[in-house]
């Protein structure tokens, strides 16, 4: 096992650090940035289905559902296709309306999640085309779907999903860019800009990993907090949910993720000097709005930990701690903002003496309802 951990103390940490290389594995052979080409067999063979789709329904559970939420923003922005993101467990028992022109995308790291599998079967029965995004090759979901694309993240052992999440976002971004190109919903220059940005994202993820020391320091200050609030807007709202989930899963600290603007409809009541609030505030994407949210937290004496773009000055003045990530296109920020949140949860869990790789009550693959 020590050898499998490759010198890291836990599988989770190893998997966090693998992200620059596995993101590259995800787009290898699929993203040819200099030629302006994105190609994936599963998409090319079924391009008409996607282009005729009146709606995309994403079904997933857990972290994969969060990747689906990020994809909702990306698909709607790039390819202008309406997207609904569903918990597989809710979808399957709701008598959902599914039309033959719907494309269902099922996202699953393991490819074995019982609820996701059942949702796929239901969608197929009702005539939808079902596309799988799985990590485990040959898994039940990869076999049950009409077509699909693997994330190629390699085995993920830590129960808390890390590299599966970022590679899912990567492949879903590639798919939406491919569709945008076919539909002409992105300008040529934007399309090429995103391709170039994706190509350099592994290096930026590696840079984001350099936040490890600061994440560790922040962890040592807040490791005993009973509650934590995570806030983000737009593309980074799902990242807030995922950040909170990571903390809950491995450190057993109660954490909630919220869209920053919804804070005033409830969570703001929780804020006092004992409440750490992690705010995802990259320079693009409603930055000014997030800054006002931060001011609201500050005026209630909340402790602010902000994830910001390198060189940020405005948030730095307000926040108790800042964690800097490199600049990138707004739609790709989740790939970077996620990294310090994974590290923060990891260090808090280690400092609390938790079993990071196998947290209590949780399973890597949930094959029962
Ligand atoms: C379990 C795992 C999570 C995972 C979820 C969905 O709860 O502990 O890490 O996100 O299942 O799993 P899947 O394999 O379908 O992505």
Image (spheres, rainbow, N blue to C red):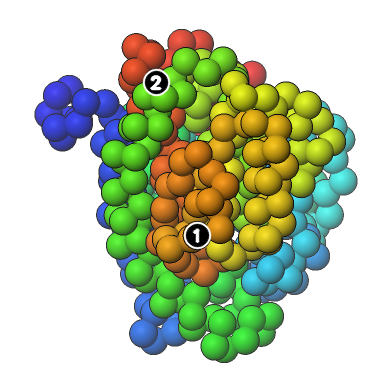
Q: Answer whether residue 78 is visible to the viewer in this image.
A: yes
| Label whose residue precedes the other's in the sequence (2 or 1) | 1
Image mark for residue 340: none
**Picture coordinates of residue 15, whole percent (x, y):** 31, 38
Task: Answer yes or no: disc 1 within 8 Å of ligand 1.
Answer: no
Task: Answer yes or no: disc 2 within 8 Å of ligand 1.
Answer: no
Which is nearer the eye, 320 or 252? 320
CB-based contact (under 8 Å), mark 2 and mark 1: no
Q: Select label 2 or label 1 by which is in front.
A: 1
Q: How many marks?
A: 2
The residue sitting at 46% across, 41% down in the picture is 321
Which is nearer the eye, 159 or 253? 253
Which is nearer the eye, 190 or 158? 190
Point out the image quarter for the C terminus: top right
In the image, residue 37 sits, relative to residue 27, either above or below, namely: below
State how far apart marks 2 and 1 are (Cα): 30 Å
Instruction: Find disc 2 in the rendering and name its residue.
Output: 349
Give the image quarter of residue 95: top right
The residue sitting at 34% across, 46% down in the picture is 211
Give the image quarter of residue 351: top left
The residue sitting at 43% across, 29% down in the picture is 345
In the image, residue 314 sits, relative to residue 278, either above or below, namely: below
Seen in the image, is 325 located left or right of residue 82?
A: left
Seen in the image, is 322 located left or right of residue 275?
A: left
Task: Using a 10 Å C-alpha cutoff, classify the residue at mark 2 as few (fewer than 14 neighbours), some (14 to 19) or many (20 or more).
Answer: many
Point out the image quarter for the N terminus: top left
Query: SS for tag 2?
Result: helix
Instruction: Find disc 1 in the rendering and name its residue.
Output: 313
In the image, residue 183 sits, relative to residue 339, either above or below, namely: below
Task: Using a 10 Å C-alpha cutoff, classify the residue at mark 1 as few (fewer than 14 neighbours), some (14 to 19) or many (20 or more).
Answer: few
Seen in the image, is 270 located left or right of residue 98?
A: left
**Picture coordinates of residue 362, whole percent (x, y):** 49, 17
């Amino acid at each position: 096992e020590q050898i499998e951990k490759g010198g890291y103390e836990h599988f989770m940490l190893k998997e966090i650090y693998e992200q620059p290389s596995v993101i590259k594995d995800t787009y290898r052979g699929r993203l040819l940035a200099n030629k302006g080409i994105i190609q994936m067999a599963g998409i090319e063979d079924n391009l008409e289905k996607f282009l005729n789709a009146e709606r995309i329904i994403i079904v997933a559970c857990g972290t994969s559902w969060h990747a689906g939420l990020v994809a909702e923003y990306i698909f709607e922005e790039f390819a202008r296709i309406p997207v609904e993101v569903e918990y597989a467990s809710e979808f399957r028992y709701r008598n959902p309306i599914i039309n033959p022109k719907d494309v269902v995308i099922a996202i699953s790291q393991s490819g074995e999640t019982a609820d996701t599998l059942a949702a796929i079967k239901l969608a197929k029965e009702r005539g939808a085309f079902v596309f799988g995004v799985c990590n485990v090759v040959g898994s039940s979901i990869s076999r049950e779907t009409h077509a699909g694309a693997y994330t190629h993240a390699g085995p993920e052992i830590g129960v808390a999903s890390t590299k599966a999440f970022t590679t899912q976002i990567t492949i879903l971004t590639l798919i939406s860019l491919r569709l945008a190109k076919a539909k002409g919903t992105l300008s040529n220059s934007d399309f090429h800009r995103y391709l170039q940005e994706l190509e350099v994202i592994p290096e930026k993820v590696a840079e984001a990993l350099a936040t490890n020391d600061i994440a560790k320091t922040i962890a040592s200050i807040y490791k005993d907090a009973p509650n934590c609030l995570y806030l983000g807007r737009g593309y980074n709202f799902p990242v807030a949910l995922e950040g909170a989930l990571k903390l809950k899963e491995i450190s057993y600290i109660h954490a909630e993720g919220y869209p920053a603007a919804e804070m005033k409809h409830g969570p703001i009541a929780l804020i006092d000097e004992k409440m750490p609030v992690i705010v995802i505030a990259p320079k693009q994407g409603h930055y000014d709005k997030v800054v006002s949210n931060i001011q609201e937290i500050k005026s209630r004496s909340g402790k602010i930990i902000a994830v910001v773009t390198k060189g940020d000055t405005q948030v730095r003045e307000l926040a108790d701690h800042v964690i800097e990530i490199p600049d990138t296109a707004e739609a790709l920020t989740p790939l970077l903002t996620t990294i310090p949140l994974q590290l923060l949860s990891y260090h808090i869990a280690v400092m609390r003496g938790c079993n990071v790789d196998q947290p209590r009550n949780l399973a890597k693959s949930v094959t029962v309802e």
